[in-house]
Image (cartoon, helix red, strand yellow):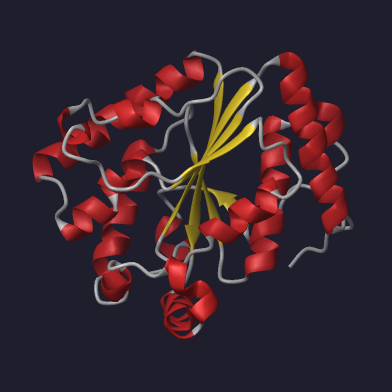
Amino acid sequence: MAQHPEDDDALQLGLVRMQQAMAADGSRAVVVLEGRDAAGKDGTIRAVTRHLSVRNTRVVALPKPNDRERTQWFFQRYAAHLPSAGELVIFNRSWYNRAGVEVVNGFSTPEEQAQFLRDAPDFERMLVESGIRLVKLWLDIGRKEQKKRLDKRRTDPLKALKLSDLDAVAQKKWREYSAARDTMLDRTHNPIAPWTCVHADHKKPARAAIIRHLLHTLAPAEVAGEIDLPDPEILFPYDPDTAQDRLAR
């Protein structure tokens, strides 16, 4: 594993400088964080937003749609949370629920799921063409690591708020989630809105790699130039030809 000379403070300072530049030039960015249950999305968000401006940073974690929202265009409730000038929006799970959780648990119809896979690339193309910089991250963990984290949720009272009904099926339906992930990544990865994968079994290296990736993707050249690229053994672009070997099965 490659060693990086920057300490955590340097990475955090890079994020602050990135947001200062976004506020100055009015740029907009969306980060989509996806992954299995217990993949580390919440901890990643805390690491990224630790020193960022609350006014210019929004974390979106939507509950299941209500009766009215179920009658809307599927992307409508997500579009309502897109950034204005100078803002960074992080989706803790996103429209990709329809390609993952809903597929595995039957929360939408096969026709709705197929339509989503057709429509998502067009929706994201419109976001990018409107000037929004879009970063899509898949946090990938192994089955044993997921079990360890889910078990800790059930025994640690400080993690009680993380418990959900879906935790009970995460391990039982591991293969179904793997199949849904593979279809989702393959059908929605493209040059305009590519997926980036992160080996997330080890939390701290994964979070550091994600911050480096964000800086090299969203920060000005003078900021990114002071930060090493993320370790390619931890963070790497999705490739359908190698995914079978690189992602947890």
Q: How many marks?
A: 0
- Work out whether residue 220 can be spotted: no
Front-most of 57 and 35? 57
- Work out whether residue 142 can be spotted: yes
Expressed as whole percent of the image width and height from the top left, the position of residue 232 reads: 66, 55
User: Does 167 sit above or below residue 45?
Assistant: below
Front-most of 199 and 147? 147
Q: Residue at x 67, y 44 (%)?
A: 213
Q: Residue at x 29, y 52 (%)?
A: 100
Front-most of 183 and 37? 37
The answer to whether residue 217 is left or right of residue 141 is right
Q: Which image quadrant is residue 24 in?
A: top right
Q: Which image quadrant is residue 188 in?
A: top left
The answer to whether residue 184 is left or right of residue 71 is right
Q: Residue at x 24, y 31 (%)?
A: 74
User: Does 225 sit above or below residue 179?
Assistant: above
Task: State which quarter of the image contains the N terminus.
Answer: bottom right
Considering every residue shown, the one lying at the far bottom of the view is 155
Expressed as whole percent of the image width and height from the top left, the position of residue 249 reads: 37, 70
Expressed as whole percent of the image width and height from the top left, the position of residue 233 reads: 64, 61
